[in-house]
Structure formats: structure tokens, C-alpha cells
Image (cartoon, rainbow, N blue to C red):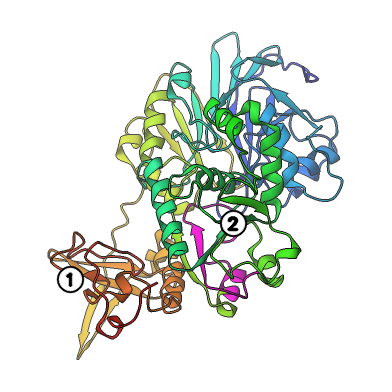
Amino acid sequence: MSQRPPKAEHRPTRLACLPYGVGHDHEGVCLEVQLGPYRLLLDCGLRDLTPLLNQNQPPVDAVFCSHAHSDHARGLKALHETFPTLPIYASHVTKQLLPLNWPEKNSPKTANFCQGLFWEKPFELFDDLTVQLFRAGHLPGAACILLTYRTVERVYKLLYTGDFSLSNLQLVEGLSIEALRGLSPDILIIEGTYGTMRHPHRRQQEKQLMQRIHECLTHGYSVVLPVPTLGLGQEILKLLRSHHQFTGRDLDIWVDGEVANACDRYLDLLPEFPLSVQNFAKHQPLFWDERICPRLRRLTPQQRGKIGQTPCIVLTDDLTTLYDEGYLLSGLWVMLFPASPHEGETLESPEIVRLMERVSIHSESYVLAEHSDGRNTTQLIHNLRPQHIIFVHGSPINLTDLTSLEELQNRYQLHLPSTGKLVELPIGDTFIQPAAPSPGVYEGELNDVERNITITLPHNIINDPHWRYFADTGLVEARWQGDELVLRGISQRELVSQSNTEKVINDLDCCLTCRHYRGQRCWNSQSPLYGFKVTPEGYCPVFEPLPQQEDEQSP
């Protein structure tokens, strides 16, 4: 039990949340919650810890880490070094994974400054304040954190989801709504990474990714997958080791950077993984294996200049280093980026844009979501039925989309805080209807001059968070939808993908090289894709090559 602060007598109960970082862009997540006399920190993923460290005494009474991803945990070590007596808590698995955030030499194998807590067992932090951890899915060790504060008048509950997923992943079971249903929190702090977007079933996402990798290898391409250090890379490796399209295949899978060290840490934690994963590991190695195909090995300097000569797969958390060391200079390559938002390299990152200009490599994205989509987010909310909901962790546009849902506005008090803005959370029996957001309807002018059309919009439209994404490149796509003209902004990712499409060899059987592909749509009446907009790398059973390719031999 941590050292207790002096009890505040006759002090009115105050519930509030002060965000130091709400997870927009790359700022990280760090939230201070106030429960009566207590101040607690939920996660510490800040890059700049000045607001927390520039004090003579610990800024809070205790710290809780939801999981080991850097945008939630990277500031913990510096916080501990500045305030060694400040108690820090996490699940036992997260405690083992935390050191991966500080990969310098001689770093401890476990985060000794962090105390591990057991699942669902109430831990008495102070006489009138307890904490419980519930499995959140998303990543091994990831936890939802329930804080229960008791006063003479009533009991107050706050639930922080951290990052969560209701779907079962390859290496971690999803969050169980049944385990949380009876908690009835007054306050819910929940991630909204995907906003209102909806995803296919998790197994369908996995199937599509494995099929795409299979197609690339079949046509002579090697595949490089930039992934974060923890989570997604290990999920993909488990898929490649167990999916029917790769079982027994004569193929090399190389793992580079800190992703390999994270795999080692996973192996140390096998008893904490789902039984299905433990059973798999009894029959063959979960990761490193040079005997059973596909072979899975670390990428070392000895392989420089060799990989890519025959089709292979490479996973890395440092793509620029991979290029600088000469690994991507030979052979044909396809780069698959995760479409899910995570901190690190994306197709829009400046260093990746420069790399794409230097290397002849085709790039595209895939979906393998580790966070819940909009449908599951609202499902969890309706099962918990809190009075206050604070949305964090996601782009402003995605979080705004969630707070604009009428099904949430009509039932709950919604908050979309910004960094440094205190959110008061009064609890009562009377529901206070939150103000509805602006409908976002603007009037403008349309001028038709000879063959050019100019659409003029009022200046205040740029204040809407959607404008940043709409005007990303200054290019738009226009199409008719009934009697309405629909405009859609073209993103940098689409431009990069389109520019690299030309780098794909012409003998690849895909929509781009099909005689029926025009205007980004399929015009083959015999195809199930007839009339639909299709991606250039797509494929269907009635593919017909372009006339100039008919005499060429396909790979």
C-alpha cells in the first residue's frame, strides 16, 4: 500500500480531469484525475514532461499505466527518476514489457519502479480509494482501470479504458463486456481512435492481409512491413506462422530492430498468454525457428545485400535504418503500411516520403485493427451507462464524429477536452443535456466561367476540424450522387500510392493492368466488381490483360 496523504476534513467532493496529453497526433496520453482529496495520473506517454517535472514535490499521489505502448508509457522512467517515492502501478505483464520503451544498453529487464497488480482483485490504494484492473484486449497486459472512491454520502466510480479491443487478436483475448457490465461507472474515460468508422470482422482482416502478402510473394516481390515495436508485429508473425497459406512454405521471415527484442519478451511471458497460444507454442516455436517453414529469424548485418534476391518478408520498427544499411537496394519490394493510426512511421511521414523518392518500391496500406471501431465503442458505452464520457486518444476529427452521435448526445454528458483544459465532472441525479455541436453547414458561391468552375466557400469553414484532412493536398475528387455534387479531398497517402503504382511491373495481374479498368472503376460486365470503384492492385477471376501484355509471359 502506498504512503497516504493527509485526509481532508469537511472538503466538498470534487471530481475533475486535467489532461496533460489527450493523444492527438503524437503528443501521447497523460491524464490527471481528481477524486475528492486525491490526484492520480492515468498513463504518462508525454514526450515533454516539463509540466509534471517542474515541481518541488510529486504532482500526484499515484500513477497508473494502462499498457506498455510508448504513447502511454514513455514518460514513466523520467517521472520515477525525478520523484523516486511516487508509486507507479500496472498489470504484471505490462511491468515486464515496459523496459522496451527504453532500449538503451544495460536497461533492466523489468520495470522495477513499477508495482504489478493482479487482474480484477481490488487493491486498496487509500482507506477510501480502491483500484481494479480488467483485461482490455489490444495488447498483452493492457488494462482498463477502475477507481472507486467512497465518501459518507455516496460511492463514486471512474473507469479508464486505456486502449481496448473487443475482438480476440492472435495473442490476446478481447475485452469482456460481461466482466464490466455491472460496474456502473459515473465517469468513463474512453479512447476513440477510429471515431465512428466500422471494420470487417477481425478474422476477415487477417485473411485479407495474408492473401495480399501471398500475392506479392507469388509475383516475385519481397514484402517489408513497418510496425511498432510492440503488438502489431508479433500479431503478424503469429499469423504467418499459423495461417494455411504459409504453413510449410519455403520462405524466410526476417525481424529487425526492437521488434525482435519484443518477441523475446513475449516468450518470457508465455504463461500469461491465452491457452490457445500456449498450446501452439508446445508444438512449435512461437517465433524463432530455422527448421520449420516458414523460417523466422533475426535480421543481422550478415544478410546485408542478400535479402530481396528471392522473395522474403521483413518486419521492422525502423524503416530508414533498414534502407541506410543497404537492405532494400536489391530485388523487387512492396511496402505494406498499417492503416490503423499508431505512433511511428506512416506514408505521410517526411522521412518515409524521402525514402520513397530514393527507392523503387510500391506501397499500400492494410487494416489489422488493434483498437475497437465505432460500433464496438458505442456498444461498450451503452453497456456501462456512465453519466460523463471523456473521449481521448484519436484525431480531433474522429473524436468529434463520436461526440456528434445523437445516440450518445441524448443519453450522456460528453466531453472532448484539449491539453491543459480542466474538465469538471459534477455527479448528480439530474441529467444536464450537453449543447449540440455545430451542424457544419456552410453557404458558398459557384461560378461557371467558360470550361472552368470555381466554388467559393466562406472563410469560417476552415475552423471545422474536417478541413485539415479535406484540404491536405489541395486536390479534390468530385462525383454526382443523385442531384447532389459530392466533393472529397485526396490525401497524401492516396497521392503516394498513386505515384508508386507506376513502379509496379507491368506483368502483375491486377486491375491496373486489366483491359476493363478505366477511371478507377471496373467496366467488365462479367466481373463481380462491375461498376464499382476498385483499387489498382485489386484482382478478380475474369481478369483480362491489356492488349500490349497479351503476348508477354505472366509471373
User: As drawn, which residue projects farthest toward the top?
Assistant: 152
Residue 252 numbered mark, or none? 2
Residue visible at 13% across and 63% down in the picture: 482
Indicate the quadrant where residue 97 lies.
Answer: top right
* The C terminus: image quadrant: bottom left
Which mark's residue is nearer the viewer, 1 or 2?
2
Segment colored magenta: 327-355
Nearer-N-terminus badge (1/2): 2
| Residue occupying image coordinates x 24% and y 75% | 445
Residue 156, position in %: x, y?
55, 18
- The amino acid on which the numbered mark 1 sits, given as a three-letter code, is Trp
Circle 2: element type: strand
Marking on residue 167:
none
Closer to the camera in the image, 474 or 431: 474
Residue 339: in magenta span = yes
**Left or right of 294: which side holds 473?**
left
Please state which of residues 306 and 476 is positioned toward the viewer in this rendering: 306
Asked whether 422 or 344 is in front, the reply is 344
Q: Which amino acid, by three-letter code, is at mark 2?
A: Asp
**Contact? badges 1 and 2 (CB < 8 Å):** no
The 10 Å Cα crowd at callout 2, few under 14, some 14 to 19, many 20 or more, is some
Whether residue 410 sits left or right of residue 209 in the image: it is left
